[in-house]
Image: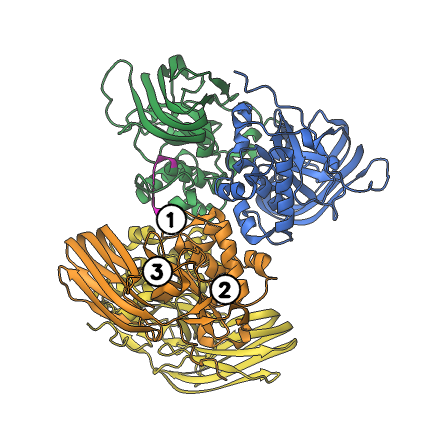
Chain colours: A blue, B green, C orange, D yellow
Amino acid sequence: MRYTLGCHLAYEVKQETLFIFNLEVAKLKRHVDLTESLSLSPDLPVRRYTVPDLGNRYAAVLVPAGAFSLDYEAEVTLDVLRGDPGGIGEMAVADLPLDILPYLLPSRFVSSDRLAPYALAEFGEAPKGFERVNRICNWIHDHIAYQRGASDEETTADETLLKRAGVCRDFAHLGIAFCRALGIPARFVSCYAYGLVPCDFHAVFEAYLDGRWWLFDATRQANLDGLVRIGVGRDAAEIAFSTPFGEMTPTGMEIRIARADGAPEAGPRTTDAISTEEPAPNAGAA
Amino acid sequence: MRYTLGCHLAYEVKQETLFIFNLEVAKLKRHVDLTESLSLSPDLPVRRYTVPDLGNRYAAVLVPAGAFSLDYEAEVTLDVLRGDPGGIGEMAVADLPLDILPYLLPSRFVSSDRLAPYALAEFGEAPKGFERVNRICNWIHDHIAYQRGASDEETTADETLLKRAGVCRDFAHLGIAFCRALGIPARFVSCYAYGLVPCDFHAVFEAYLDGRWWLFDATRQANLDGLVRIGVGRDAAEIAFSTPFGEMTPTGMEIRIARADGAPEAGPRTTDAISTEEPAPNAGAA
Amino acid sequence: MRYTLGCHLAYEVKQETLFIFNLEVAKLKRHVDLTESLSLSPDLPVRRYTVPDLGNRYAAVLVPAGAFSLDYEAEVTLDVLRGDPGGIGEMAVADLPLDILPYLLPSRFVSSDRLAPYALAEFGEAPKGFERVNRICNWIHDHIAYQRGASDEETTADETLLKRAGVCRDFAHLGIAFCRALGIPARFVSCYAYGLVPCDFHAVFEAYLDGRWWLFDATRQANLDGLVRIGVGRDAAEIAFSTPFGEMTPTGMEIRIARADGAPEAGPRTTDAISTEEPAPNAGAA
Amino acid sequence: MRYTLGCHLAYEVKQETLFIFNLEVAKLKRHVDLTESLSLSPDLPVRRYTVPDLGNRYAAVLVPAGAFSLDYEAEVTLDVLRGDPGGIGEMAVADLPLDILPYLLPSRFVSSDRLAPYALAEFGEAPKGFERVNRICNWIHDHIAYQRGASDEETTADETLLKRAGVCRDFAHLGIAFCRALGIPARFVSCYAYGLVPCDFHAVFEAYLDGRWWLFDATRQANLDGLVRIGVGRDAAEIAFSTPFGEMTPTGMEIRIARADGAPEAGPRTTDAISTEEPAPNAGAA
């Protein structure tokens, strides 16, 4: 499916500010025929860095005091892989590629070490594999209220569990924490999300099952086969859409994604297993 | 200087356990003429992974129930770079290579976001560069008691600050947190430490100044020019010397390092600027 | 029912230490025909204070360096009040006596403010009154593992919920937190507990329903009609059996309680509503 | 000195709400010739409770949906006791009246147990008595920024220490925590504060020294001899000026205090030792 998407961000910069943006479509094999443009006003030099293997694209701009805005436009065909949920099992930790290990460890907002007893008590006996991660998502969807303002940029997964409320970022952190606590590698994904209402940058997560990363969205608010990835990381800290160093105030923000053929959104949301990632390189070979 | 070093670890494994060890000397250009041997008892297959660029070496071993031990022996010449502390300044965030960015972000045990006000209040006005990081180390040395048992494997930098006590791991986390909060990239280093009494795996940290990683040890317990690196990471989570998945009990542990020529420890500890890392690749080029 | 009970505590005092003990049977109307003796070795002066209304008895002893022990023996008839659980409802907050208010507020280990969303989500729709508090106890019993060593003297109710494990103190704190969060006054009770195996100082809680304090034990380990009260307070901080100021090490501790007639423990544990408290004085009158 | 003071509070009540107010001048011997009036609009019945010994006055009002306002007016002569700071020492814990004990224990927002190492490291060697508590206040004043919005109603003393910012409530909690950690009983005081700009409900604290409660204000914003007490408690939880149970929105709030003779504020703020409390009853007698 081909999508057209983009965003408009505006800021009032009070003192010279370095922005590190991470909002362009990730460089992935399954992102096909990408066309895009990034324009800044005023026009300023951009320093760029793409993370090897992951495809996250960082753009650094040093902005002087004054009004500043950014417009990003892209069109891309999303060539998702569909799997049979019933056939996707877990891997023993002993069989995981060793370069996947960091995604088993706790990170700033994913306190999987603190949440291990909770995860084991709730999901320790669940059928392993796609089914177990799906149950984690259902549990989060049923127990955590989606509520703007319930969290802030320092909220951790264990706090979300206590508060019983959060936004997509928190849903993803909690899902990742439960997975890691159970020995399932998991990581944070930021994206443009087809079907999300109202449209916004979205956060979901990936779990590593049977040698491949599979997508999960515990908010159940977007189409899993309509997620155009921006970045992937240990947690939200690594892939904020904008990391500013300086003094500024956001003054505007619009995000959009639609089918490139202009057709309306297709019916019900899929419950298929969806992946946009290639299998990991065989890093764990003896 | 050439060092001979090694460790002996023993475990009683109750149920099949996957160990991921990270205790071999890192693959670095400044680790010269490395000779080494790793032996396991019983002899078991080892899966290996070396992290590109960083040189951390992971060894995974699946161990059946029963007694298990590991012996590592190595000899290596440490070709440190010495700098003039007075000439080492900070880089503006806008000038940092973009692949260094993750070391500015908070991580599981380095709550640099929570500690930002504290760091700014204590060190915001200090002279920038090597001098500022040195002051951070002096402050930690003067304010935090080195005390075994004061912390555990979930202790974060802000907890150490409140408890006013910790071990080398906690001193490093706090130093890293203050640096990151001030816009100085910093990361966690595990090592064999010449001069440390009693000998143990040691933890120090590196701060990124003037385009290179420089070593700092807020415990002031080892020689900065006698640190043979094992691994480097965001914080202790990433480079534990042993990450076990299974049920086991440690039953023995010995670590050693000495000058290969058998000479006694040289006089007072250096206050030079010491680095064993090459400058970062030019990832930040426009 | 008449009980014989007591305790033996021993300490090695390193530097002069003030002990404030709270281990004698509380002064309550329903504690009938109390006979008791407290002996110290060495024999030292005791300063005493009994809290008005509550009946908690504090005994302060200043102990010089050396071995120190305390023996307490008591016999008391426990005249419990039994209620019909089905007939015990909640009071509207507007109808509560105002001197009960402190037991609605969060305290050091009872983070009822942080746990309010959790309590509302789990128990907000439960039938009000004795039944609701009973469900809270069942939920705690089913979700929290009784596990020595899972907590320490700084553990709060929200931490217990995350750790899914604790001891009687933690079970009581969590029960109190859920009650307060729902608008039900609740407080911490320390006691000698007939039927507890192995015997120890026990902690349970009271909830204020229909104008009277009713006993609840989320551990389900003791007989509700065999709890001889020592003290009552906001949480464990207020009624530790021993609060030492100084340097000492506990060297021995034995607690015992048995039926005074020597009969063996009677059959199954009661699920009745049990109270040993008189209704609150009419503090809330207009 | 005679003061005239008062407050106006207004609310939009959405669903029937029980308000428990604690804003009337406390019943104290040193509050002389108190005249006052409390008027509600609409006029509603008030249930009252005055805490024995402490003098805190609670007023409960059940308010139906709609606009609601409260006006309180009072005039009182404040007969403060002045002491000589140099002559006010600390009492050994062994000499404290036992009914003072609760003010040595940690409470919800006063995490004196967690802050004990910090308190000992900073103030363990300070001269004991009034001087030590004064140093604590100076330290807080120098290290914590007075900043509206830096904290919320769940902020604890250890969080304030990390954030290096707070409001009067947080300054008081931190001062109390340091005192308790050092063995000095301390408690939270809410008051009308002559000299505070802009005028608001104020929070200070009392430390128990040489058998009497003495006032301290780590914010240094009000006159110690111009504090007309409302309430006293373990911490802010116990003496909020308004504790609402229900759904409502505050719509207005004005607080005022002035000299009854209309004279302008007298010169510099006193650094005397000031007390408005009688010595504790001799609860600790053997």
**Picture coordinates of residue D208, whole percent (x, y):** 29, 68
- Asked if labels 1 and 3 share a chain, the reply is no
Residue that numbered label 1 is attached to = B162
Residue that numbered label 2 is attached to = C180
**Picture coordinates of residue D93, whole percent (x, y):** 24, 63
Determine whether the residue tagged by mark 2 lies in a helix, strand or loop: helix
- Asked if labels 3 and 2 share a chain, the reply is yes
Q: Is residue B182 visible?
A: no
Q: Which of the marked residues, 3 or 2, is nearer the chain's N terminus? A: 2
Other-residue count near label 2 (Cα within 10 Å), few / some / many at <14 / 14–19 / ≥20 = many
Q: How far apart are marks 1 and 3 (CA)?
A: 41 Å
Labels 1, 2: front one: 2
In the picture, measured across the screen, residue A280 lies left or right of residue D166, that is right
Give the chain of mark 2.
Answer: C
**Quadrant in the picture for residue B70:** top left
- Asked if labels 1 and 2 share a chain, the reply is no
Which numbered disc covers residue C194? 3
The amino acid beneath tag 3 is Tyr
Give the chain of mark 1.
Answer: B
Which residues, given as a range, are shown in magenta? B161-169
**Picture coordinates of residue B126, whole percent (x, y):** 41, 42
| Quadrant in the picture for the C terminus of chain D | bottom left
In the picture, measured across the screen, residue A98 lies left or right of residue B192, that is right
Q: Can residue B215 be seen in this view?
A: yes
Q: How far apart are marks 3 and 2 (CA)?
A: 27 Å
The amino acid beneath tag 1 is Leu
Closer to the camera in the image, D159 or B84: D159
Q: How far apart are marks 1 and 2 (CA)?
A: 29 Å
Q: Is residue D38 above or below residue A88?
A: below
* Marks 1 and 2 in Cβ contact (< 8 Å): no
